[in-house]
Amino acid sequence: MHTKALKHIITQRYTALKIAVRDIQKGFDKDAIHAFRVQVKKLRAFLRLLDLKLPGKIKMVYAAAGQIRDVQLQVKQIRKASGNSAAPAEYLAVLEEQLKKRKAAFETVSKKNQFAGSKQKLFKKLPSKLPFESIGQFLHGEIAAILALINTGLKEDNDLHRTRKKIKDIIFINEIYQEALEDHHGPKILDPPVVKKALALAKELGKFIDKWVALSLLKPGSLTAIGPKERNQLKSISRRWEAQKQALRKSVSGKLKSAAFRRALKG
């Protein structure tokens, strides 16, 4: 791919980002936030392929959107975990106050950080050509990095987080590559069965990470203003979530370490 094609891909990503930010500003819908975060991850993956970094302005808006998403998800999970019992009203009020502040912060940062300037700066850093072979080399390098993480035993929560990021990167880069092949005939990079397995594992890893984040929002330090009755209720929820998190860890780690997944990655 020549510079013109690279610029076209980046422009597509920037257009999608702009639309997604506008959709978030309309009402902070969780699907709009998800769509924006996916578009940022796609751009970030493509820039990594080019050995470029995601612009700081986009990082700031992405972080602000992520903070809203975390609280929205926490409210949903707390209500679900309460079951037939009364939901912890004091804690939910704390979350709603956090949500209000995070929405205000997003509005400020998203209006302040316009992306057009950063796109032009990226254009100046683009290579004159990106051989299709380089895409394959990048993907296989990411696969090697995933296998290296698996070989360490995936003992830390962050190991699973890093593994998911790399799996998502190869999925996004493969997707961009396939789109490019509509105009340029090149070799196939990843077989559909490999992509299917990778998508399934990324989804399961996402559930693990969501539980990890949810537990971080229930740390004792965040419950100091909550009454003893609700605090006990939240501690009970926290214990259940910890058990669920460990079950997810065991399940997804086993699948990542399986001989079948290793063979699929190695092709």
Image (cartoon, rainbow, N blue to C red):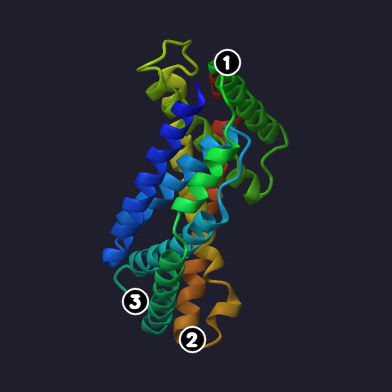
Percent x, y of residue 40: 46, 47
Residue 133 is tagged as 1
SS label for mark 3: loop
CA–CA distance in space, label 2 to label 1:
57 Å
Identify the residue under disc 2.
226
| Image point (45%, 86%), residue name | 229
CA–CA distance in space, label 3 to label 2:
13 Å
Number of other residues with Cα within 10 Å of mark 1, as a class: few under 14, some 14 to 19, many 20 or more: few
Amino acid type of the residue tagged 3 in the rendering: Ala
Q: Earlier in the sequence, mark 1 or mark 3?
A: 3
Percent x, y of residue 185: 42, 10
Viewport quadrant of the C terminus: top right
Q: Is residue 54 left or right of residue 34?
A: right
SS label for mark 2: loop
Mark 1 against mark 3, which lies toward the viewer? Answer: 1
SS label for mark 1: helix
Identify the residue under disc 3.
87
Q: In the rendered image, is residue 190 in sight?
A: yes
Amino acid type of the residue tagged 2 in the rendering: Ile
